[in-house]
Image (cartoon, rainbow, N blue to C red):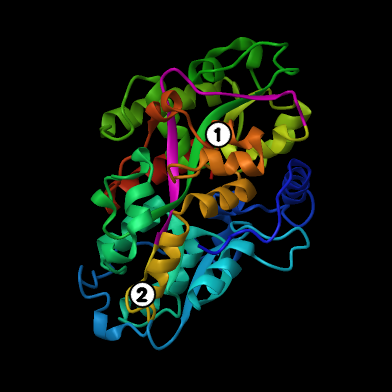
Amino acid sequence: MESYETERLTPARLAAMRRSLSNGRGALTRRSLLRASGMGALALGGTATLGACGIPPAGRAEGGTASDDHSAKEKVVNFSNWTEYMDVSEDEKSRPTLEAFTKRTGIRVKYTEDINDNVEFFGKVKPQLAAGQDTGRDLICVTDWLAARMIRLGWVQKLDASNLPHAFANTSAQFRTPDWDPGRAYSYPWTGIPTVIAYNVKATGGRKVDSVTQLLDDPKLKGRVSFLSEMRDTIGMTLLDQGKDPGKFTDADFDEAIGRLQKAVDKKQIRRFTGNDYTADLSKGDIAACVAWAGDIIQLQADNPDIKFAIPAAGYITSSDNLLVPAHARHKANAEKLMDYYFEPPVAARLAAYINYVCPVDGVRGELAKIDPEMASNTLILPDREMAAKSRSFRSLSTKEETAYEEKFAKLIGA
């Protein structure tokens, strides 16, 4: 097998990468763009209003056929991804894992970081997919709720398992059977995104904060608490704290969670609802504790030892970003080979070391330890068995539910 590395990533280099992500070129990180509740889409011309309502399904199996695949003749794959979501060399002039893939297979990767927001991206590709046309993309990476929508609409292709031996064998148990794609027939995970509780130990006076109940009710935290402006994360964590399963909740459960959060807003316990702009306030101590995304916390901890995280006893929410092949893509087999490549442990380790989110690939720990032993022991990147057991996913929503729930949540957060 060709080596995936063109250089050795030392801890010092990794720390420099993390700082560059939060200072300067990565000031607007992919997570802020992903989770800003459509604000990026609104800024780009109001496309946040685009939804699944009234869109006719394209048909489950008609997204493409073997005769439509030009992979054998055209050794290329067009891959659309989020910003800052692929490993780069120290001088930022190359992408080592992509280059190693091309060297091994002869398949050239046209890699584009043109996904800035799920809603905005869906608006871009919807007209072509609805018309049964090729989007010009062979592989895309979108968040689970949008992946579910595109599968439901019949706008992605069923994967050929024979091209995905590593993905089939190495996908971690917690990512194997999402309710929106049982058995991973249409998608495979790129990363997991844990939602945890974070706190600044200096701002809390040395106290640990490890439950949503503390965030909502502890008078010592009044006015110094934030929750996320992403509905699934904030409601999901609140449901868990209430003893409810985010994978099976009812309308009444949802309303109870909204009511509980509303009380905390009314008594000014919650300071605000945020995208990942909570990071600056948490680091300074203006926010003492919050609901947070794990990737942000890893980056903050690199520069501030006062930043801690906790996994509530009630559990935590994990969402995911996922790889899919759009309907009518010209190079499906090539896309599948690239997808499978990232489930080889050495390659997956290199990617995880750069992007700092949960790696969905089993067998990575030893490979990641060769790059950075500290990262290999970080449960926010490689959850241990106990942490993985506490992971819960927010269930898929019908179009009607999604509309109703988002309206109630928007009213709560003042959006």
Whether residue 321 is in magenta: the answer is yes
Left or right of residue 354, residue 360 in this image: left
Residue 159 in sight in this render: no
Q: Secondary structure at mark 2?
A: helix
**Residue count near mark 1 (Cα–Cα under 10 Å), binned few <14, some 14–19, many ≥20:** many
Q: Is residue 204 visible?
A: yes
Q: Disc 2 to disc 1, how far (Cα)?
A: 32 Å
Name the quadrant containing residue 237: top left
Report the residue at 49% width, 37% height from top.
Answer: 194
Circle 2 sits on which residue? 332
Q: Which mark is residue 394?
A: none
Residue beneath disc 1: 380
The answer to whether 334 is drawn above or below residue 394 in the figure is below
Which residue appears at 69% of the width and 37% of the height? 279
Q: Is residue 131 above or below residue 266?
A: below
Q: Position of residue 337 (x, y in %)?
A: 40, 68
Q: Earlier in the sequence, mark 2 or mark 1?
A: 2
Q: Is residue 219 above or below residue 276?
A: above
Q: Quadrant of residue 150?
A: bottom left
Which segment did they paint magenta?
A: 304-323
The 10 Å Cα crowd at callout 2, few under 14, some 14 to 19, many 20 or more, is many
Query: Regarding mark 1 in the picture, which secondary structure is present there?
Result: loop
State left or right for residue 112 relative to residue 315: right
- The structure residue drawn at horizontal position 34% and vertical position 39%, both measured from the top left corner, is 173
Spot occupied by residue 104 in the image (x, y as percentages of width and height): 52, 71
In the rendered view, would you say 364 is above or below 340? above
Overall secondary structure of the magenta section: strand
Query: Viewed as shown, does residue 354 lie left or right of 35?
Result: right
